């Protein structure tokens, strides 16, 4: 995350993503739980205001999310819309860690995540939603915020 964002906001994003990742890790036996946990903890690490050490962390995260992208492609063979979302999220994390600043790609990802967040929010308002949906919505909002700062 860029240093132009206030450190307090960075730490709030770290806490939000780490809490979402922790919840997803606890429910990791269910489909998608482990992938959601990796995304939550990865987003938390990426949002840390690390200064000069941040580049090394971003390179390590880039490698982790390259592997997560390969896993999501592998899981797509069996179908499932959620695996496609994991693929988009993993590729977005690779993009933000290794090659940030390509305006058309950033714009496309912002459109995707704004739609994801709006759809997720409407589902929360439309009926009894579990904590899982709320965590995914929180991570979607976090991803949108990180993309917005590129």
Image (tube, helix red, strand yellow):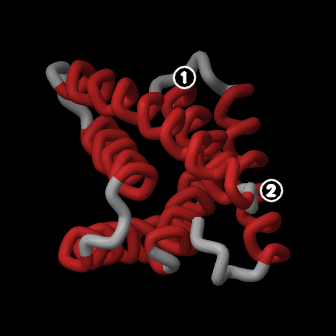
Give the quarter of the figure containing the N terminus. bottom right
| Label 1 environment density (alpha carbons within 10 Å; few <14, some 14–19, many ≥20) | few
- In the figure, residue 128 lies in which quadrant? bottom right
Q: Is residue 54 left or right of residue 110?
A: right
Q: Residue furthest front?
A: 52
Label 1: element kind: loop
Which dot marks residue 15?
2
Label 2: element kind: helix
Tell me residue 125's x, y (percent).
57, 74
| Label 2 environment density (alpha carbons within 10 Å; few <14, some 14–19, many ≥20) | some
Q: Residue at x 56, y 33 (%)?
A: 38
Q: Residue at x 47, y 79 (%)?
A: 148
Q: Is residue 9 left or right of residue 89?
A: right
Q: Residue at x 39, y 76 (%)?
A: 114
Which dot marks residue 62?
none
Tell me residue 134's x, y (percent).
63, 57
CA distance separating discs 2 and 1: 23 Å
Q: Nearer the viewer, residue 145 or 63?
A: 63
Q: Residue at x 38, y 50 (%)?
A: 98
Which dot marks residue 30?
1
Give the quarter of the figure containing the C terminus. bottom left
- In the figure, residue 103 lies in which quadrant? bottom left
- Does residue 109 appear in the picture of this structure? yes
Q: Nearer the viewer, residue 103 or 142?
A: 103
Tell me residue 113's x, y (percent).
38, 68
Q: Is residue 10 left or right of residue 112?
A: right
């Amino acid at each position: 995350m860029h240093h132009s964002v206030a450190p307090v906001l960075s730490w709030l994003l770290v806490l939000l993503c780490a809490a979402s990742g922790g919840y997803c890790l606890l429910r990791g036996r269910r489909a998608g739980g482990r992938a959601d946990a990796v995304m939550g903890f990865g987003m938390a690490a990426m949002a840390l205001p690390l200064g000069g050490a941040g580049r090394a962390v971003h390179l390590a995260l880039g490698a982790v999310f390259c592997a997560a992208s390969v896993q999501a492609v592998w899981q797509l063979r069996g179908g499932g819309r959620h695996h496609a979302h994991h693929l988009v999220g993993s590729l977005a994390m690779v993009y933000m860690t290794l090659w940030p600043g390509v305006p058309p790609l950033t714009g496309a990802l912002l459109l995707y995540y704004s739609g994801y967040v709006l759809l997720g929010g409407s589902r929360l308002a439309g009926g009894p939603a579990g904590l899982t949906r709320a965590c995914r919505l929180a991570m979607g909002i976090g991803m949108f915020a990180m993309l917005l700062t590129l």
